[in-house]
Amino acid sequence: MERTSKEHAAAEGGKAEETTYKQLINDHYHLSPGFLSPPRDNSVRRLYRTTAMVLLSALLSLALFHTSHASTAPSASPPTDSRLLRFSSDHTEWIPSPALEYLLGFRHIMNSQGRWMPSPPSSIDANIVRKSNNILRDVSDAAIQALAGREGFKVGYIDITDSAGDITQTSTSVSLQAGANLALPYPTVDPAAHPDYKTLAAMVSVSELRNIVSNLSTTFPTRYYRSTNARAPSTWIQSYMSTFTNVSATLFENNFNQPNVISRLSPPGTNTSTATVLLGGHLDSTSQSPSTLAPGADDDASGTAVALHVLSILAKSGWAYTKAKYPIEAHSYAGEEGGLLGSLALARSYKSSGRLIRGMLNLEMVGWQPESTGSSTITVLKDPNSEMSNYMLSVIKAYVPTATVKSTTCGYGCSDHYSFSDAGYPVVCIASYGPNDRNLNPNYHSTTDTIDKLNFERMADFARASLAWVLQVAS
């Protein structure tokens, strides 16, 4: 059946886009054109197809064999200079550090307009990429696709190298998603039962949100976790939060020079054995030039700012001491862009010490709101805990009715909430848009992710929604 002119145009446009993407990869990684297209002679083409099918079948079998072995039994003796990465609850694999750096470089390929090229993992031809560099010879197809692919802010893996000795967490998947289906002990969402909300919501300050983001994204040219000044943003957050009455702000050291910051409010009669309510955002940033310039205003100074501001409101209002039944913490995670490094270390520390978590709300890129009309857009990520996500949707609709509410999936290793889910805790994450939404901030992971592009009036709705969630969960 002949195609319509519209279908033909769409097909041709798709071919052009694919060709452009492949050409960019060719130019960037110097791949041979022979890897991308078969020979023209018909007899050779038939042989090419047959051989390709045989090779594809063999490669698929090899990849499945490699993945299954890597996921169920990571080597007790890790390869030299390698990182142990978890790509899903049943896929864990040692990746040589040079291969990791090389593959992540694919995520920074831009088009001629200086925009990121859309490259979901499913679009990556692992065989072509593998042939581009010999260091990839033992890396599985799934790992190549996950690392070279680009899905918005999604990290897509968790670096568990530093806890590789914990066999129950690295070699089995039985307990990994223990937090994904926990029954919620929360009360029914009811604004009438929380009259304090209006007073607290009125304390949300656009200027203070801007102040926090400004300090994080302009005072520090980069917050990249491996930069020479990586520690400074953490100590700034600690000093800032220490100015609020009854807030304890402490550093949680990592194996790299950027600590997490734990800001805590402890109501009378509570202690570390009392279940804690968590708010979180990651303090680090990245870009094409992460060591020198990575402002990260939206990703994720915005989410960090909301978490810190909400805790400061709960402190200044006195609500945490008179109404809260549970301690409340605002976490600022380090090294998220390196594979959820800081949040994983903290989540495992809490788990090993028997700490109870009543719920964790993660905030990821909440400042970019490009629509010229209408209200704010708040997206609730559906995974990994559908009950937590549905509860958060109800909270937003009840307490912030003017917001446009969306929901979408993100996938394993999306952001820091996955570290706590893997430790068995109930989690939820909100963002302006999902990782594949057409309205996602096009400046993320670039030197142009700057404060002037954010909408703080709409960002304030995330603070209101977070306050409402805390009232519902911590009362």
Image (tube, rainbow, N blue to C red):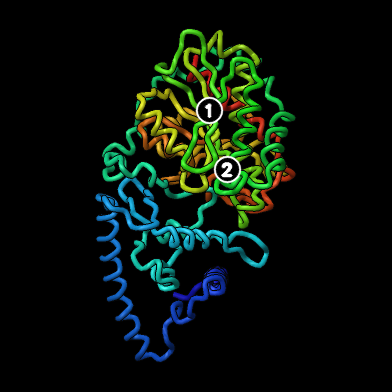
Instruction: Please provide percent x and percent y for residue 303.
Output: 59, 36
Of residues 130 and 391, the one drawn nearer to the viewer in this rendering = 130
Q: Quadrant of residue 118?
A: bottom right
| In this rendering, position of residue 326 left or right of residue 209 | left
Q: Residues within 10 Å of mark 1 (few under 14, many from 20)?
A: many
In the depicted structure, whether residue 116 falls above or below residue 460? below
Give the residue number, with chain letter if any, for mark 2.
284
SS category of the residue bearing label 1: strand
Q: Residues within 10 Å of mark 2 (few under 14, many from 20)?
A: many
Give the residue number, with chain letter if any, for mark 1.
262
In the depicted structure, whether residue 310 falls above or below residue 38? above
SS category of the residue bearing label 2: loop
Q: CA distance from mark 2 to mark 1?
A: 15 Å
Q: How many marks?
A: 2
Residue at x-position 41% and y-position 91%: 41
| In this rendering, position of residue 90 left or right of residue 467 | left
Residue at x-position 57% and y-position 60%: 108
Residue at x-position 50% and y-position 43%: 256
| Three-letter amino acid code at the position of disc 2 | Asp
| Three-letter amino acid code at the position of disc 1 | Ile
Q: Could you tell which of marks 2 and 1 lies nearer the N-terminus?
A: 1
Residue 179 at least partly seen: yes
Q: Are marks 2 and 1 in contact (CB under 8 Å)?
A: no
Instruction: Please provide percent x and percent y for residue 181.
Output: 35, 32
Of residues 414 and 387, the one drawn nearer to the viewer in this rendering = 414
Instruction: Please provide percent x and percent y for residue 189.
Output: 49, 20
In the depicted structure, whether residue 109 falls above or below residue 38? above
Instruction: Please provide percent x and percent y for residue 204.
Output: 68, 24
Of residues 382 and 71, the one drawn nearer to the viewer in this rendering = 71
